[in-house]
Amino acid sequence: MSLTKSELSQLNRNGERIKSNVRSILQLVPNQSRTITGLTNWSGVNKSTCQRFIHALTKSASGLDVLLMLPGIKGLHQLADSLNQLLDDEQLNEYFSQLIELYKDNVHEHARSHSQLKTMITSAIQAQQTSPEEANFEIRKQLYQANSELVGESIESSIGIQFLQVNKQDTDFLSEFIVTNRNQVVLKNSARPLIQTFVGNEGQAAVLSKPKALLSTGFDEFDTQHESTYLLQDYSHPRFSECFKGVGKLQNSLIYDHTSINLENKLFNATLGYFNPNAQHNPLTTDAYVNTHGAFCRSPTKRNLIISLIEKRLALHSIPKAGCYQTSVKIQETSHHSDEIWNDRLTGTPEITLFNPASSYFEKTLGLDHVGTLIEQCAEMLQVDLVDYLGYYIDIDYPIWLTTYRIYFDFE
């Protein structure tokens, strides 16, 4: 009996979930006991079991690796009993219960024993042919892990949202609202500060100031008449505003020093927005012919999601294109067609997906519970109806560090 590609994929996802539980368990263990020797001496469980448990976190590159490295169910029960006695922590017991239950399910569903399951996984991996896309994915994943360790920075997911609409007061211009939502950011004290840049469109650089803090209960403070910058507190660390250290020299970047409130190695979120009522000339009434929405991967990032919401009357006259470029967005590039800077584009084109922003199906497809709510709240700030918009997105796992992923709208 062999594993299908679908079964192998499911096992890989389950292994990733188990790895998350292993990480949570070890975070509850005293620092000096998080090594193989330390855990062995402290728990009283044999060294082989402790080694395999720790290696499942530190040596695994995939969920399948986790299943191959973990000790057997008996060993996991021994470790769980010992640690529960030492710590008497309800959360620890819950983590172990989830881990062991999922682990048992994997074995019982596919094999007669843990040993047989490992053999089946190993055989399936060896038999599986790797496509160029899968090979590139694995390389990007390895680079993410290596670069994160190298620079002491990592981001679980970076979500960029663009609203593009005709200016209600002056129809010769387009208004643009850009929101960048970073989730589970980790920065060591030695890491660079978090910097958010808003470039602008049509060769005119954004001019930023200290962001105004907004709660979901205070959207009436959103200014739809003037260029403005915002910190969305509902999607940010409660003390993130205290990290603000000013605006960059070019006036188009916001600088946040994470060491100000001791965020070293702690997961935190940060969500910033920039609104420009006159972002660029309206291509339907003027000679303007392109709009760009891009996200620069300044820190190693696990998932990069770029969403553009464009008024239907604009979308009907535009063609969306996407690409990955080796440098950050330069202000002089934003008013050029994507084909005009082909020399800076890397091979491989991200797939653009069209969606209905007024439908909840979009959120379920992405598997990100908060994105739909964030989009709805952005629409509320702008005082617009999502039924008047079409949505486009590109979704990249393990984006290439220090590159820019962009969506272009070329207008007829």
Image: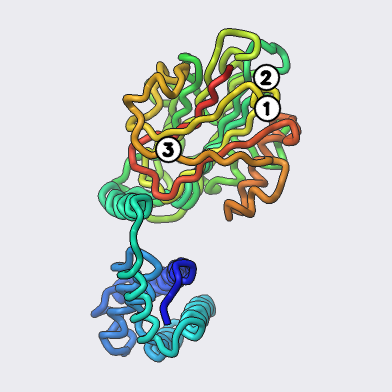
**What residue is pinned by disc 2?**
166
Name the mark nearer the viewer: 3 or 2. Answer: 3
Residue drawn at 68 percent across, 40 percent down: 357
Q: Position of residue 274 (x, y in %)?
A: 56, 28
Determine crowd level at label 3: few under 14, some 14-19, many 20+ residues with C-alpha closer than 10 A.
Answer: few
**What residue is pinned by disc 1?**
311
Q: Position of residue 406 (x, y in %)?
A: 46, 32
Circle 3: element type: loop
**What residue is pinned by disc 3?**
349
Q: Does 87 sit above or below residue 298?
A: below
Circle 3: residue type: Thr
Q: Which label's residue is closer to the chain start, 3 or 1?
A: 1
Circle 1: residue type: Glu
Q: Does 173 sit above or below residue 409?
A: above
Circle 2: residue type: Val
Do residues under tags 2 and 1 come within 8 Å of each other at their CB atoms? yes
Do residues under tags 3 and 1 come within 8 Å of each other at their CB atoms? no
